[in-house]
Image: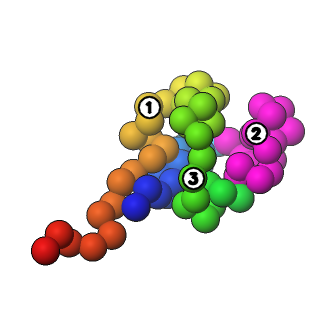
């Protein structure tokens, strides 16, 4: 499962708010909602967030295995 928990941590460190992402950087409220629910977002959105936050992909996205392989 892909999670965006690290995004919220990175945003806090960089003092970035959801409001600023929407208002000043053009990230849609729908995309923010999808990120909150760990739903699919495009690699373009991830790239844009990395540019805005001046960070790496690993600072935004994390992969967690859902179930152990049998």
Element assignment for label 3: loop
Was residue 27 drawn as part of the magenta stretch in this picture? yes
Of the two numbered discs 3 and 1 in the rendering, the one whose residue sits closer to the viewer: 3
70, above or below 60, in the image: below
Q: Pointer 2: residues within 10 angstroms few (<14), some, or many (20+)? A: some
Q: Quadrant of residue 64?
A: bottom left
Region rendered in magenta: 16-32
- Residue 52 place in picture, x, y as percent: 64, 28
**Badge 3 is on which residue?**
40
Q: Quadrant of the C terminus?
A: bottom left
Residue at 78 percent across and 31 percent down: it is 25
* x then y, percent, for residue 17: 72, 47
Left-right relation of 9 to 19: left
Alpha carbon distance from label 2 to label 1: 18 Å
Residue 48 location, x and y as percent?
62, 29
> Looking at this view, is 54 or 67 the one in front?
67
Residue at x 49% of width, y 44% of height: 60
The answer to whether residue 38 is left or right of residue 69 is: right
Task: Name the secondary structure under disc 2.
Answer: loop
Please give the residue where the numbered disc 2 appears in the rendered image: 27
Residue 35 screen position, x and y as percent: 61, 55
Residue 36 is at least partly visible in this image: yes
- The residue under label 1 is 56
């Amino acid at each position: 499962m892909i999670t965006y928990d690290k995004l919220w941590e990175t945003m806090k460190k960089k003092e970035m708010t959801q409001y600023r992402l929407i208002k000043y950087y053009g990230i849609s409220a729908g995309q923010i909602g999808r990120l909150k629910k760990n739903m699919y977002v495009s690699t373009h959105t991830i790239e844009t967030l990395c540019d805005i936050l001046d960070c790496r992909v690993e600072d935004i996205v994390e992969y967690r295995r859902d179930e152990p392989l049998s």
